[in-house]
Image (tube, rainbow, N blue to C red):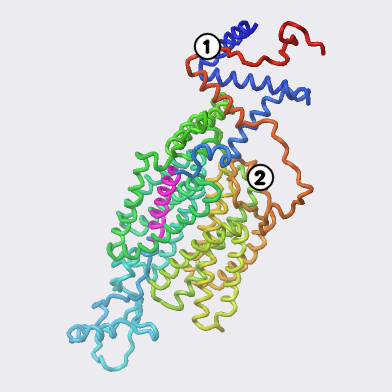
Amino acid sequence: MYKKETLMGKNKFRHFAASYRSTYRSTTASYRSTYCSTASGVFSRFSPSSSSDVCGTRLVLIKRTLAMEFETKVYPQIGGYGRYNRVVTVFSWFPNFAVSLNLLCDVFFTLVPESYHCKPDPSLLPSSFLLSNFSRQTYLNFTIPWIDGYGLSPCKLYKYPTNFTNFTGRVYREVVPCTRGWEYANPAGLRSNFVTEWDLVCGAYWKIPLQHICFMSGWILGYVLLGSVCDWLGRRRALLLTVSLSGLLGVAVCLSDSPTTFQLLRLCHGTVLAGVFLSSYIARLELCDPPRRLMVSMVSGFFAVLAELVLPGLAVLCGGWQVLQAVATAPMLLLLSYWCWASVFPESPRWLLATSRIPQAKRCLQMFITRNGVHFRGDLYPAETLLTEIDVAFPEEPQPHYHHVLELRHTRVTWKNCLILAFTLFIGTGIQYCFTRNLHIYSPQFYFGYFLRALMGALACGFLCMSVGRAGRRGILLLTAIVTGLSSLLLLALTQYLQGVLVLLLSLVGLLSSQALAMLSVFFAAEVMPTVVRGGALGLVMAAGCVGMAASSVMELQNNGGHFLHHVVFSSFAVLSVLCIMLLPESKHKALPDTLGDGEALCRLPLFLSRSDQDVLPLLRARPPASEYSPDSYSRLVAATRKMLTKDPVPYRVIASSQQPLLPSNGVAPGGQEDSS
């Protein structure tokens, strides 16, 4: 009997092995059909009417496990935040340095020299004056009007009568605009820039804030358009495309021969720079686990501060704005090496799974597993388990499914979060003009305000690193909004009654809090937006921040005529944002949402986080319901079976036990007698 059973089992095994060695796709289909039939039989005892839907329900569960629980299911099996993830993170910081360098160059390109005046025009002077031997200062005093408290007039010249001979008496002299250009003191850092080359002072001064507005308009356009490109093409392709275009446009800006050409090229350059920043920021965030997302994002902020500190030295060394533009473009050209060196900036596996690009996702996950050095655990290889689970969830290669940012209109929670964070970022960037203007009033030196702003940016990054991980995103965002609003209101009401040191101190506190508010708004928005539309949604939030930055240029376009109204409006908005922030969810230690449904599931928790065991009574603590199906266990079983089938079949060997069973399965006792019981 034992021999007969052994032969029957051996034949069944050979038949089973042959059916699984046909093709890879037929193997997956066989597992699926076997599992569905088994699950239907089990669940039909409890719910006969739903037994036909069990298979689809279980497979949907596997797909949701892969999509929703990337950190808990997929991330640990590819090595977590391992060696390869850390290397990719480091290389994702370099684009932030290059983008910040090109963004801040605009400050030096459009910086008006501290002193300038008209070039003397000999045709406006009498002939007898030209024959006289005057010193340089006396010559300027006779040709250029003097303004009390300022010095030589920057925009006017004297015009003398042709028969004028009395240089010592007081006579009527006509005042006319400059006719032969201007003489400038050296701008900060650069010997020549956009202003001095094309004489954009006096009547042509309006072209300087117009250039700022054009540059910021390019960033707004880039965030809105290229954010969706990140969701359609992927993070890596979007980065390579925008880096290539930014390198070409950066070189083209160096060849500008007129203010109009310069403004148009800077608009296009700002558009692609926004795409570089957006794609690198999102890819960096999606490669990190929840505990490290904050630190990795804040370190990228330190790279931006480093670019801000290095830029004045580069300006001094370069001298001309064309050379500085070429030097700022060089890091972008170096980033083109990512095109050939694909491993330093791979595609986001989270985005590949969320958009159902399964073949690319499997290759990407296999690369992460290999480069992270994931080893065997027992008899199973983590890659085999993970890839098998993906095969079960997607037995047939699905078509990639993309989403558009306009789909946010049909959501409620996600759209609300996007609007609130766009509003806070708009306030954080727009109100900084009110604080930096006080810095210029306290000290007219350019480098004084420049380095104080850079120092406040570094302190804001450090403050967020130390506080957000402990108190949560929403609590610190609320704190920075309150401090920003209070600082602005105090300056608005008490500036004329406070000493200069107190005004400077309040301005620095407001600048620190507003920069922290802006940085945390961007990070918060990236965490709560779903993966399928994270690029487009974050682009909308960042575009609102650029609108706030462009508001200061609008004030300068009106010759600072609306500064008081600007200050009142943004102070009121800062107070209003305190109420809006209360409606946001908390994303601390939470997985990133991948689908629009995941984004809608982010509920609003109490403002201050509490321990999970404070509201649970020990005697009433209920056990979590046992899972009806474990994808982990099933995928491990499938992987073990496949591993066994790839080996050469070994014939069964029956090893007789030294102790006979008490009661065999046929109910016959040893010795051939039936059991009396």
- Let me know if residue 189 is in the magenta part: no
Residue 495 seen in this snapshot = yes
Query: Who's the residue at 54% across and 29% down the image?
Result: 399
Callout 1 environment at 10 Å: few (<14), some (14 to 19), or many (20+)? few
- 570 or 295, nearer to the observer: 295
**Is residue 607 placed above or below 130 in the rendered structure?**
above
Q: Are marks 1 and 2 in contact (CB under 8 Å)?
A: no
Which residue is under mark 1? 651
Question: Would residue 27 be found to the left or right of residue 310 on screen?
Answer: right
Q: Amino acid at mark 2?
A: Glu
Question: Would residue 174 be found to the left or right of residue 49 on screen?
Answer: left
Q: Which numbered marker is on residue 484?
A: none
Query: Who's the residue at 34% across and 53% down the image?
Result: 329
Q: Which residues are magenta?
A: 83-104
Query: Who's the residue at 56% across and 61% down the image?
Result: 467
Label 1 SS: loop
**Residue 51 quadrant:** top right
Image quadrant containing the N terminus: top right
Callout 2 environment at 10 Å: few (<14), some (14 to 19), or many (20+)? some
Residue 121 position in % (x across, y down): 26, 76
Q: Amino acid at mark 1?
A: Pro
